[in-house]
Amino acid sequence: MSQHRLIFGCGYLGERVARRWLAAGDLVTVVTRSAQRAAGFASDGLSPFVADVTQPDTLAGLPAADTVLYAVGFDRAAGPSVVETYAGGLSNVIAALKAEPERLIYASTTGVYGDAAGGWIDETTPTGPGREGARASLAAECVLTASPLAGRSVRLRLAGLYGPGRVPYLRALSDGEPIAAPAEGYLNLIHADDAAAVVVAAADGPQTPSLLCVSDGSPVVRREYYSEAARLVGGPPPQFTAPDPDSPRAARAAVNRRVRNTRLVAALGFSPVYPSYREGLLHALGSEPDVS
């Protein structure tokens, strides 16, 4: 039976989810701040709703939906802080929903965990976010778990999303320029198409846990990942340099952990199309990668 899906944040992940739901015959409403983007969504067969999650008055009239996905990204140029966007926005959305959805999914991040010195972590590992964005994501999780919708909610802690148009440092790799990151340390990844498949499965799974770590389950050392990316773009083996100690890159690089996806596999039968960075990079970059 057709479902009504409501998406806040129809970006790199949300748009992929929207396409899957639309292809399944569902009615998909997408919330955007941009009238121009709304027109584009409408031409794609989606139902746009123009609103700003940080402005509660704009959320009046939200349609009732079977599933709500909150995957709003942070836009520094928009004005509101990352906490206002993630936690405040989610709080505003929950308050504006006139009818309780069957399921509310929040796209969080594995960044809510701290450093594990290269060890394995999972859903039972205590949180300890170091970066501002990760702290805001955890604050949003707390909003959700304290809300009346807690029993209908799923928090998906996503590893690093990658895919077409989202592989960093391509120009540097192609030109043989150094990458501002340590060569060692693990990257935890999930191809965007696989992440979208997880959202779709989590929305309708009868026994979906309230918390899932979403990764391909194959952590890779940074040097190996960028060596393969360099090979695919025809560049030399990558060189690495220390990032600016005050930069967000340095904060990310200081954390070294490996994310298990055991619960995800057991609960949803997850079998990624791109089980490691090798398959994922080959798809993301293809035979003629864009290094502009």
Image: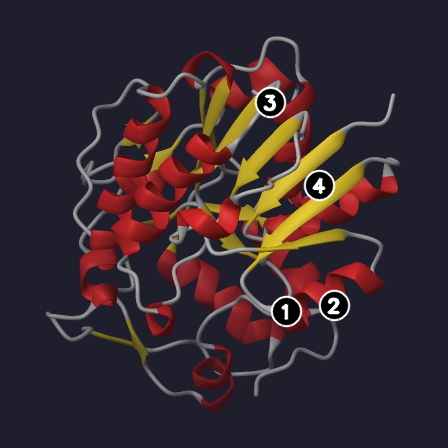
* SS class, disc 3: loop
Query: Is residue 35 among what the camera can see?
Result: yes
User: Of the residues shown, which amino acid type is indicated by label 2?
Assistant: Ala
Q: Position of residue 268 (x, y in %)?
A: 63, 19
Point out the tag, 3 or 1, that comes first from the N-terminus: 1
* SS class, disc 4: loop
Hey, which residue is sitting farthest top in the picture? 207
- Dot 1 alpha-carbon crowd within 10 angstroms: few under 14, some 14 to 19, many 20 or more: few
- Whether 11 is drawn above or below 235: the answer is above
Residue at the image point whose x is 49% and y is 24% from the top:
154
Point out the tag, 1 or 4, that comes first from the N-terminus: 1
Q: Which residue is mark 2?
A: 39
For the N terminus, the quadrant is top right
User: Of the residues shown, which amino acid type is indicated by label 1?
Assistant: Ala
* SS class, disc 2: helix
- Whether 127 is drawn above or below 239: the answer is above
Residue at the image point whose x is 18% and y is 58% from the top:
251
Point out the tag, 3 or 4, that comes first from the N-terminus: 3
Q: Which residue is mark 1?
A: 35
Marks 2 and 1: CB-CB under 8 Å? Answer: yes
Point out the tag, 2 or 3, that comes first from the N-terminus: 2
Q: Which residue is mark 3?
A: 101
Q: Position of residue 135 (x, y in %)?
A: 22, 44
Q: Nearer the viewer, mark 3 or mark 4?
A: 3
* SS class, disc 1: helix
The label number, if any, that marks residue 180 in the structure image:
none
Query: Is residue 185 among what the camera can see?
Result: no
Residue at the image point whose x is 62% and y is 18% from the top:
102
